[in-house]
């Protein structure tokens, strides 16, 4: 469910055009389209084939892409895996949140995640699997529409109006029959802010329920969110308030480490 390529290719300053073009090419590789040949990729990002092949060759030299000699097609390479791992380990939010996320998973048996807002999507930057098997689609690097996730809704509830408008797409396409969209979604944000956690009950995927809470910094800005997720058979309506309290309390402790000092319930 990666968002379509939106990064502009125009050059903001001298000497950066090749970098922006290479980044655009890398971002074209998605879960839905993990393999490209040079011609198709060139067309997708608006480059001629010669330029695209030259950039792909440079990216291949540092193992950011790898070429299949039999088909001459490209996929993302191990160099990006190493780079992404270093970026994830260097994240201060991840470092501050790690122990709490691990404790949530260990204490409940459910899968815990740490996620950040990127454009109009939530990106999983840490996942601690629980005792129980959950959907295979949840993994580090996964991107999901902000409006269909518990973490996304938790963050939306704390955004000022202008930022909220930018984070929501003009039309929120329902992912399941239970996905909240438009005014229905907006109407629930006050309750999420008041309760300190959000619930996405089968809104992203039928049978999957998640409870998320925002992490706030010293300026009361939502910089990330944590969640617990599992199957509807385990995360029942009766159990959700207790799960919500656990996630809210963990988020409150992390927020305090991030500098947040206003009243935030940790009960």
Image: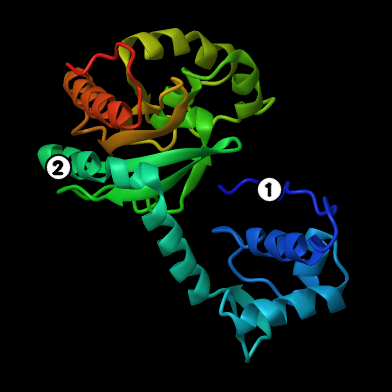
Element marked by disc 1: loop
Q: Within 10 angstroms of label 2, few (less than 14), some, or many (20 or more) residues? A: some
Reading the chain from its start, which is encountered first: label 1 or label 2?
Answer: 1
Q: Position of residue 50 (x, y in %)?
A: 86, 79
Q: Determine which residue is flagged by label 2.
A: 109
Confirm whether residue 60 shows in the render.
yes
Q: Nearer the viewer, residue 149 or 254?
A: 254
Which residue ends up furthest to the bottom in the rendered image? 70
Q: Position of residue 16 (x, y in %)?
A: 78, 61
Q: Position of residue 157 (x, y in %)?
A: 47, 17
Q: Nearer the viewer, residue 205 or 64?
A: 64
Quarter where residue 22 is shown: bottom right
Q: How is the image coloured?
A: rainbow
Q: Nearer the viewer, residue 163 or 189?
A: 163
Q: Check residue 4 in the rendering and tell me which mark sits there, or answer none.
A: 1
Q: Position of residue 69 (x, y in %)?
A: 63, 91
Quarter where residue 178 is shown: top left
Label 1 close to label 2 by CB (< 8 Å): no
Element marked by disc 2: loop
Give the residue drawn at x 35%, y 54%. Answer: 136
Quarter of the figure with the C terminus: top left
Q: Tell me how many marks there are.
A: 2
Left or right side of 180 for 251 = left
Give the residue drawn at x 44%, y 8%. Answer: 190
Confirm whether residue 178 shows in the render.
no
Q: Within 10 angstroms of label 1, few (less than 14), some, or many (20 or more) residues? A: few
Which residue ends up furthest to the left in the rendered image? 107
Left or right side of 209 for 102 = left
Give the residue drawn at x 26%, y 32%. Answer: 232
């Amino acid at each position: 469910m990666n968002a379509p390529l939106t990064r502009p290719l125009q050059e903001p300053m001298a000497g950066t055009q090749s970098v922006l073009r290479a980044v655009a090419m890398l971002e074209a590789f998605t879960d839905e389209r993990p393999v490209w040949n040079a011609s198709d990729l060139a067309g997708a990002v608006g480059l001629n084939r010669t330029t695209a092949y030259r950039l792909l060759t440079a990216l291949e030299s540092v193992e950011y892409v790898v070429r299949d000699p039999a088909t001459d097609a490209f996929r993302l390479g191990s160099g990006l895996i190493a780079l992404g791992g270093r970026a994830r380990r260097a994240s201060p939010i991840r470092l501050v949140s790690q122990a709490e996320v691990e404790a949530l998973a260990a204490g409940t048996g459910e899968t815990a995640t740490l996620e950040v807002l990127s454009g109009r999507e939530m990106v999983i930057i840490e996942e601690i699997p629980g005792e129980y098997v959950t959907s295979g689609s949840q993994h580090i690097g996964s991107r999901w529409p902000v409006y269909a996730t518990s973490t996304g809704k938790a963050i939306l509830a704390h955004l000022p109006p202008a930022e909220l408008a930018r984070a929501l797409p003009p039309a929120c396409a329902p992912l399941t029959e239970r996905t909240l969209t438009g005014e229905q979604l907006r109407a629930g944000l006050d309750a999420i802010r008041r309760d300190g956690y959000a619930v996405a009950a089968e809104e992203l995927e039928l049978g999957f329920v998640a409870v998320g809470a925002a992490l706030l910094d010293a300026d009361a800005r939502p910089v990330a969110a944590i969640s617990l997720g599992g199957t509807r058979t385990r995360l029942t309506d009766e159990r959700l308030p207790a799960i919500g309290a656990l996630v809210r309390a963990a988020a409150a402790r992390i927020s305090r480490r991030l500098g947040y000092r206003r009243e935030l319930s940790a009960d």
